[in-house]
Amino acid sequence: MKVQAYLAFNGNCQEALNFYGELFDAEIKNKETYEDKKIDVPASYRQRLQHAELKGKGVHFMAYDASPDTPLNHGNQVHMSIDAENKESGKQLFEELSGGGQVHDSFREREWGYFGRCTDKYGISWMVNNAK
């Protein structure tokens, strides 16, 4: 069994994947736009991503730009979780992810290790953890 996250964006999927790819040293793979699909979407959607994957060492998730018939609501139903290798890398990841977004729990020491929770500038919720 394999469980993966599939993130939905409102027209800025490519921008978000570029950001995450640089942050996590991962590559965008299997990128498809709406261009040649038999889907009823406006011409302005044709260059948006219908599917893409971000793959790297320890990173693999899928993403797309939701079509107009799939309204997006910001919510807290999904969190991406990162187990950082050490406190320093966890702190750096947290600072970069929370930049331009919202910090819910600052990255600090907890009883099990270091932890922080934020929503990034694209509306995706993240938990960064480093166990002792």
Image (cartoon, helix red, strand yellow):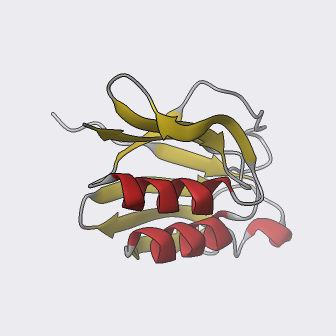
Count the marks: 0
For the point 64% across and 74% down, the residue is 35
- Residue 34 seen anywhere in this rendered image of the structure: no
Q: Tell which of 56 and 112 is nearer to you.
A: 112
For the point 78% across and 37% down, the residue is 71
Q: Tell which of 67 and 74 is nearer to you.
A: 74
Q: Tell which of 9 and 105 is nearer to you.
A: 105
Q: Position of residue 96 (x, y in %)?
A: 60, 63
For the point 71% across and 28% down, the residue is 75
Examine the image and state in which quarter residue 4 appears: top left
Is 110 on the left or on the right of 2, as rendered? Answer: right
The quadrant in which the C terminus is found is top left
Is 125 on the left or on the right of 43, as rendered? Answer: left
Examine the image and state in which quarter residue 28 appears: bottom left
- Residue 124 seen anywhere in this rendered image of the structure: yes
Q: Position of residue 18 (x, y in %)?
A: 56, 75
The quadrant in which the N terminus is found is top left
Q: Is residue 61 above or below residue 3?
A: below
Q: Position of residue 121 (x, y in %)?
A: 74, 55
Q: Is residue 19 above or below residue 110?
A: below
Q: Position of residue 46 (x, y in %)?
A: 72, 71
Examine the image and state in which quarter residue 3 appears: top left
Q: Is residue 98 above or below residue 113?
A: below
For the point 25% across and 58% down, the residue is 58
